[in-house]
Amino acid sequence: MLEAARWAPSAYNAQPWRFIVFDRSKDEVAFKRAFSTLVPFNQGWNAPAPVLIAVTAHTLTSKGEPSPTALYDAGAAAMSLVLQAHALGLAAHQMSGFDVKAFRDAFAIPADVEPLAIISIGHYGDADKLDPVLRERERAPRTRHAIGEVVYADAWHKPFSSAA
C-alpha cells in the first residue's frame, strides 16, 4: 500500500506527501494517541481497527514558497494507497474527522506540514455486530451526484453528455 502511495504522480515530482503509520500491534501508545484525535463518531466505529495512517503534506516548495499542488498531490498518493488496500482485500476508509491541532501537537508536526486525513486500515467486519445506526448506514445504498452535476462540457455548468 505504501509503495503504491510512494509512486503517485506529483507536480514537478515534488512528492510532498508524508505518511505516519500507527500500528496497534507495534506501538499501542502511539496508536492510542492518534486514535484519541479522531472525533467521537469516528472513534466509535474504528475501535477494532489495527492500523491508522495519517496523511500529511509539505505545504512549501523547496524554495520555501507556498505549493499550489501539495494538497492535490497528497490526495493522489492517499487514493493510490486506498486503491491498493482494496486490491489486497483490505478495508480502507479516509477520514477528515479528527482534531488537526491535537494531532499536530501530539506528534510534533512542523508548521509547514499540513495533516490532511487519517486512513483506517483493516478487514471488513460483520455488519450485524455494529450498533443500529452504524449498521443501517453500512447497509444503505451508496450514493453519488449524477454525472451531469459534476461534469461539464466545454464551459462551466454546460451539461455534459456521454452519449456518442
Image: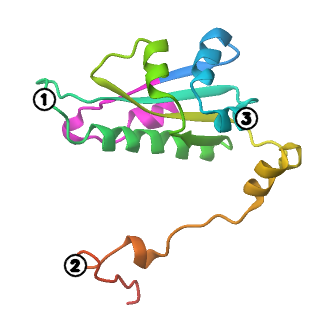
Dot 2 lies on which element?
loop
Residue 105 spot, x, y in % from top left? 44, 14
Please say if 18 is above or below 157: above
Amino acid type of the residue tagged 1 in the rendering:
Glu
In the rendered image, which residue does mark 2 sit on? 154
In the image, which is nearer the foreground, mark 2 or mark 3?
A: 3
Give the magenta part as a residue range: 1-19
Q: Which residue lies furthest to the bottom in this view?
A: 164
Q: Which of marks 1 and 3 is in front?
A: 3
Query: Does residue 120 sit above or below 9 in this rendering?
Result: above
Tell whether label 3 touches label 1 (CB within 8 Å). Answer: no
For image coordinates 54% across by 38% down, the residue present is 97
Left of 92 or right of it: where is 141? right
Of the numbered discs 1 and 2, the one sitting upstream in the chain is: 1
Q: Name the residue under label 1.
A: 65
Residue 120 percent across, percent down from the top left: 62, 34
Where, quadrant-wise, is the C terminus in this rendering?
A: bottom left
91 up-or-down from 53: above or below = below
From the viewer's perspective, tell me whether residue 1 is left or right of residue 163.
right
- Measured Cα–Cα span from mark 1 to mark 3: 39 Å
Query: Amino acid type of disc 3?
Result: Gly
Q: Which mark is residue 44?
A: 3
Mark 3 closeness class: few <14, some 14–19, many ≥20 residues within 10 Å: few
